Amino acid sequence: MLLPPMKPFRAFLVLFTSTFFFSFSSAQYTVTTEKIDGAKRGGEFNTFRAMISAGKITNTIMIQLPYDTPYPAYYFSEEKGILILVHSFDGWMDVYSEKGKKIWSQNFFKDMPSNYERTISCAVGTSSIAILTSDVTLPKAKVHKYLYNGAKQWETELPFSIGMDISMSPDEQTIIAGSYFVLEDEVRQSAAIIDSKGAINGNIDFLFRKAVFSDDNKLAALYSGQEVVIVSTETKKEVTRAGKKTEGTITDIIWNSNTLIVQESEVKTTPEQAVYFANPTIILYSEELKEISRQRIENTDFKTSLLSKKGSNIQLHINGNTITITRLR
């Protein structure tokens, strides 16, 4: 399905020139992925290719997939160059080094048939990986902790059966993992706060899309499409929450020191009913979720976007462009 034509990217730059400064830089490691389609029947294969780069050196991973097998999801450590490929349908997770060599694999659903209603999600740290797994045929979702070399540290069960999302603090001492269960018209939901040994020490009644940790690891911000919740990693309790400030939906959040940056975007549909986003508003909040400032980006349509942090700067990835924001006020 075709999306409406994208508006000129120059308008975005002009809009922010008086408020923000920009620079462009590359990570220590980067990954580029490519999906090569064409298979239509048994005996034919599609190809997934991932290229891990550091400077002028690029290592390539090539995987052939039967025509009816979904492409893997992937997670990547820019610091270590570790690439994690997740094949939820079959239950496998494969971990590759920065040289493109497979380090280890794990099947979390051994002896079970393939299933589209299955979750394998990852949060990558400096030395370890936190993994959320669930299958609709199993009673509880689980969180697993592994070192990059494949050594298992622990696993723990979550309150409900269906996994939602997972995030790990930069110091790798706290994990927040979401699970839920639908019973008739009631949704039971949980954001479990897990310590470094796998014990659940807190539980927030909130179904989040993403959780991000403050620079000092003392707070975590969680968001759904409608709300943002601040959680203390010290007390393991909710601190405060706030609803969205625009008519759109919350599409991303990120911390910059003690300031929380929230991206809210308009939701639109094409004539063919395909959903896309437009005209995001960037809102700055204090730790108490008091609004500091906001800036709307006009004439911008997109399917996906991402806020990320590079050093002390914030990057906005949108429409295939990466912009580093070096001043926020």
Image (cartoon, rainbow, N blue to C red):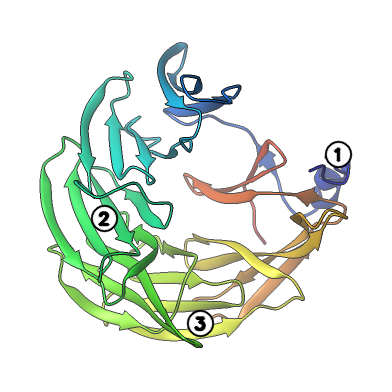
Amino acid type for the residue under numbered disc 2: Asp
Residue 47 x/y as whole percent: 49, 22
| Residue 52 sits in quarter | top left
The residue under label 3 is 288
Lower position in the chain sequence, tag 3 or tag 2: 2
Question: Real-space Cα distance between discs 1 and 2?
Answer: 38 Å
- Left/right placement of residue 162 relative to residue 10 reads left
The residue under label 1 is 10
Residue 102 x/y as whole percent: 26, 24
Q: As displayed, is residue 312 above or below residue 321?
A: below
| Residue 7 sits in quarter | top right
Residue drawn at 15 percent across, 65 percent down? 198
Residue drawn at 48 percent across, 38 percent down? 70
Q: Which mark is residue 48?
A: none
Lower position in the chain sequence, tag 3 or tag 1: 1
Residue drawn at 22 percent across, 42 percent down? 107
Amino acid type for the residue under numbered disc 1: Arg
Please tell me which residue lies in front, 263 or 110. Answer: 110
Q: In the orientation shown, which residue stands out farthest toward the top?
A: 56
Please tell me which residue lies in front, 273 or 68. Answer: 68
The residue under label 2 is 171
Tag 3, which secondary structure? loop
Count of numbered tags = 3
Residue 307 x/y as whole percent: 58, 52
